[in-house]
Image (cartoon, rainbow, N blue to C red):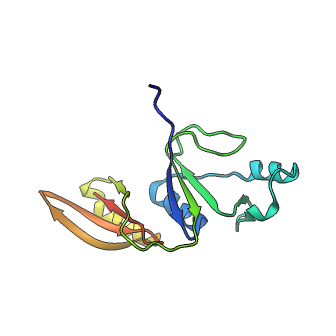
Amino acid sequence: MTPLHWKLVIDAGDPHAQAAFWAAALGYTDEDHSAFIDGLLAAGAAPPELSVTLADGRRAWRDLAAVRHPDDPYDEKSGTGHGRRILFQRVPEKKTVKNRVHLDLHPGQEKRDAEVERLETLGASVLRRVSEYGMTWVVMADPEGNEFCVE
């Protein structure tokens, strides 16, 4: 079997703010779909209300934003990544229960405290510090409350 291409999709109230947070948190690239969107709008293939103009002047999808690993391949025409990628999609409801899937970040124990502090400056919050089975990690929440761990 040929391995499948995949992306992680996260529901969000503000997909662009979430993409900005996670791009900064992971050192990822915020995907730029503006040329693709502009082409679709010019051809009449997409209605203007599906897009927004971001603060930096780029055109983006209103309800979608994505980040990708900066070293992975991507489609230059659409800006879409073909490797490690997280897509944030707008949903109307707020998060209400614990995540069933989450990210674990691995800066290394010697850098963990500094990484936790850096993530807090980006808008994350510490939920708890855990020490179990000879291991320690920090459970954090992103700006919309999605849990992740820093090991």
Q: Observer-nearest residue: 107 or 81? A: 81
Instruction: Point out the residue furthest to the right here.
Output: 43
Q: Look at 33% across and 54% down and name the residue there.
A: 107
Q: Position of residue 15 (x, y in %)?
A: 58, 64
Left or right for 23, reference 16: left
Residue 73 appears in view = yes
Quadrant location of the C terminus in the rendered image? bottom left
> In the rendered view, would you say 13 is above or below 76?
below
Q: Look at 70% across and 44% down and name the residue there.
A: 78
Residue 57 appears in view = no
Q: Position of residue 64 (x, y in %)?
A: 63, 59
Left or right for 15, reference 49: left
Instruction: Point out the residue furthest to the top here.
Output: 1
Q: Position of residue 114 (x, y in %)?
A: 33, 64
> In the rendered view, would you say 39 is above or below 90?
above
Q: Position of residue 40 (x, y in %)?
A: 81, 50
Which of the 4 quarters of the picture holds residue 19?
Answer: bottom right
Quadrant location of the N terminus in the rendered image? top left
Q: How many marks?
A: 0
Q: Observer-nearest residue: 14 or 11? A: 11
Q: Look at 57% across and 39% down and name the residue there.
A: 82
Left or right for 12, reference 100: right
Which of the 4 quarters of the picture holds residue 138?
Answer: bottom left
